[in-house]
Every structure is written in structure tokens, then in C-alpha cells.
Amino acid sequence: MAVPKRRHSKARTRKRRSSKKIKPDTVSVCPQCTSPKLPHRICSECGYYGDKQIIKKD
């Protein structure tokens, strides 16, 4: 089994781990009702996906 010859520096370790942070979800705006929604999802407020109504809402 291979064993590292020297210990990795703190900077090198932190550089590698910097991409593992939790990122907030991106939020887009519904073109019909202008409420915030997740991208590529049906709007939970009005039921539209793009310009098509998928779910009937009152």
C-alpha cells in the first residue's frame, strides 16, 4: 500500500476542500406570477412551466 512521503500543507488541503462548501440553491422568477421558484420546476403558486399551464390552480 502506498504511503505519502510527506504531510500535505494546510494551504494545499484547504484549496482542495474549498469546492466542497454548501452553496445556496439558485432561485429564478416565474414569468407568469413573478414568484420565486426553483429553475426547471413547475411554479407552485400558479402551476405554470414556462408559458404552459401544467397544473390547474385557482
Image (cartoon, rainbow, N blue to C red):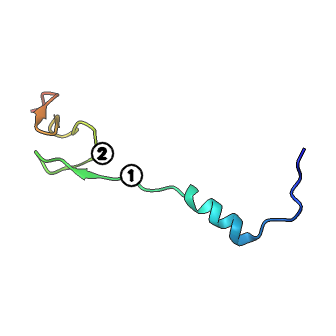
Residue located 79% across and 65% down the image? 8
User: Which element type, helix, strand or loop, lies under badge 1?
Assistant: loop
Q: For mark 2, what is the residue?
A: 38
Q: For mark 1, what is the residue?
A: 25
Image quadrant in which the C terminus is located: top left
**Is the residue marked by circle 2 packed among few (<14), some (14-19), or many (20+) residues within 10 Å?**
some
Viewer-closest of 29 and 17:
17
Type of amino acid under label 1? Asp
User: Which element type, helix, strand or loop, lies under badge 2?
Assistant: loop
Image quadrant in which the N terminus is located: top right
**Is the residue marked by circle 1 packed among few (<14), some (14-19), or many (20+) residues within 10 Å?**
few
The correct choice, above or below, for 50 with respect to 6 in the image is above
Q: Quadrant of residue 50?
A: top left
Q: Quadrant of residue 46?
A: top left
Type of amino acid under label 2? Leu
CB under 8 Å between discs 2 and 1: yes
